[in-house]
Amino acid sequence: MKGTHLGEFEELILLMVGILDGDAYGISILQEIEEQTGRTVTVSTIHTALYRLEEKGFVSSYVGGASKERGGRSKRLYRITSDGRATLENARTLRDKLWNLMPKA
C-alpha cells in the first residue's frame, strides 16, 4: 500500500464510492458529486483519483457486465475496501476533533 494520506478530492471520491455501494464507476461518481455538492468535475479527474485510491488499497475494482447503452462495452466498477472505510472513519474523527476545538462565535 502506498501512502495513507487522503487529499480533499480523494476523500470526496472515496465517500462517493462508499455511497454508491457497488454501482460506482466514473460517470455514476460524476453524477453523484454534481448532485450532492453542485461541484463540476471531469470524468478524467475522477479516474485519476480512483487509480490513486486503488494504488493505496482504499478501493478495489472489477469489470462489470456489458450494457446496450455503452455499445456492449463493460464498465469498471469500484468498491470501498475495509482499509478505505477505516481511513474515511479516521479522517472524520480527526475533523470532528478539530471542529470541537474551534472557538464558538
Image (cartoon, rainbow, N blue to C red):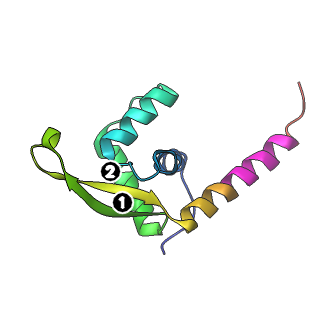
Residue 10 sits above or below residue 33 on the image:
below
Indicate the secondary structure of the residue bearing disc 2. Answer: helix
- From the viewer's perspective, is 45 left or right of 83? left
Residue 82 sits above or below residue 103 on the image:
below
- From the viewer's perspective, is 54 left or right of 11? left
Q: What residue type is labelled 2?
A: His
Q: Does the magenta stretch include residue 32?
A: no
Query: On the image, numbered disc 1 is attached to which residue?
Result: 51
Name the residue located 32 percent from the left edge and 37 percent from the top edge: 42
Q: Which amino acid does label 1 sit on?
A: Tyr
Name the residue located 53 percent from the left edge and 69 percent from the top edge: 3
Q: Is residue 94 magenta?
A: yes
- Name the residue at the right extreme: 104
Q: Position of residue 85 (x, y in %)?
A: 59, 60
| Residue stretch in magenta | 91-100
- Name the residue at the bottom extreme: 1
Category of crowding for the residue at label 1, using alpha-carbon neighbours closer than 10 angstroms: few (below 14), some (14–19), many (at least 20): some
Query: On the image, numbered disc 2 is attached to which residue?
Result: 47
Q: Position of residue 32 (x, y in %)?
A: 43, 35
